[in-house]
Amino acid sequence: MEEGRQDLKTYLAEHYEESIFSKRAADGDVVLHLHGGREVTGRLREIDPYSVAVEQNGVVEECKKLDIKFLYPADQAESVRSLLTVSARVRDLRLEPILARGKRHHVKNRTLFPLMQERAVLLFTTLEGEELRGIVGAIRRYEFVVLLKGGIPVTLMRHALYDVRDKKKKSLLKAVVEPESLVVRPQAVGKGRPVQRRGGLK
């Protein structure tokens, strides 16, 4: 490891439990992009494990966290919208929020961490097709921070992720990086059958 660089274990111990929602109103108004193409702008108020309350002009709206795809500072809204692109192919799939964690599109921390250190530009795509191109600014339990052009921070919720690709357009999802494979255990000729296991060769 290069001098001055953290290892993954140390990084996660210091930052993994951080969250955009723990900051609440300290950072001012935010724009939340919700499933269904909705946007809500306001200040984060009451927050519980499953929802957040957003206040604007005295009006409070409750948003389920699972409906939130990504959010960013409201004063950066114009810049973010100019940098957002949309994958028509993914958008036309009309995907809904994925309730079961085991069925979500996962990317492993150990895959992203070295790319964050290298400041590699990646393309993140949401379940509804929005594309965020930038470098990884933070890796957390429930979210990533993606720094767009100019260092604009966008917090992307892990549950809203459809895909993430590197500059060679290679998917970094766990299902691609660590696909299931057929494993054949040594045994006497003519006895038993090949055994399929998850995670490849042991």
Image: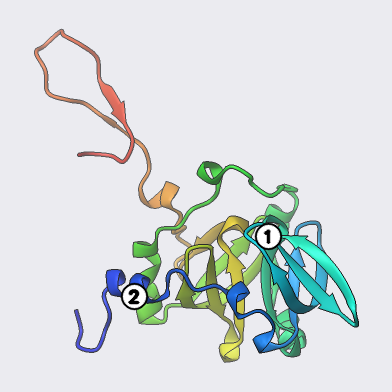
Q: Where is residue 17 in the image (x, y as percent from the top left)?
A: 46, 69
> The N terminus lies in which quarter of the figure?
bottom left
Q: Say which amino acid is labelled 1.
A: Lys
| Residue at 68 percent of width and 54 percent of height | 90
> The C terminus lies in which quarter of the figure?
top left
Q: Where is residue 20 in the image (x, y as percent from the top left)?
A: 59, 75
Within 10 Å of the Cα at label 1, are there few (<14), some (14-19), or many (20+) other Cα atoms? some
Q: Position of residue 110 (x, y in %)?
A: 34, 63
Of 174 and 14, which appears nearest the observer? 14
What is the spatial separation of the Cα atoms under label 1 and label 2, in whole angstroms?
25 Å
Provide the residue designation for mark 2: 11
Q: In this view, does 62 lie to the left or right of 66?
A: right
**Residue at the left extreme?**
188
Q: Residue 17 carries which label?
A: none
Q: Is residue 25 left or right of residue 117?
A: right
Q: Earlier in the sequence, mark 1 or mark 2?
A: 2
For residue 87, say whether it is visible.
Answer: no
| Residue at 31 percent of width and 41 percent of height | 199
Q: Say which amino acid is labelled 2.
A: Tyr
Q: Is residue 94 above or below residue 183?
A: below
Q: Is residue 73 above or below residue 87?
A: below
Task: Give the structural element (helix, strand or loop) at label 2.
Answer: helix
Q: Residue 65 carries which label?
A: 1
Of 44 and 79, which appears nearest the observer? 44
Within 10 Å of the Cα at label 2, are there few (<14), some (14-19), or many (20+) other Cα atoms? some
| Residue at 69 percent of width and 75 percent of height | 84
Q: Is residue 8 above or below residue 180?
A: below
**Residue at the top extreme?**
190
Q: Position of residue 181 (x, y in %)?
A: 32, 35
Task: Give the structural element (helix, strand or loop) at label 1.
Answer: helix
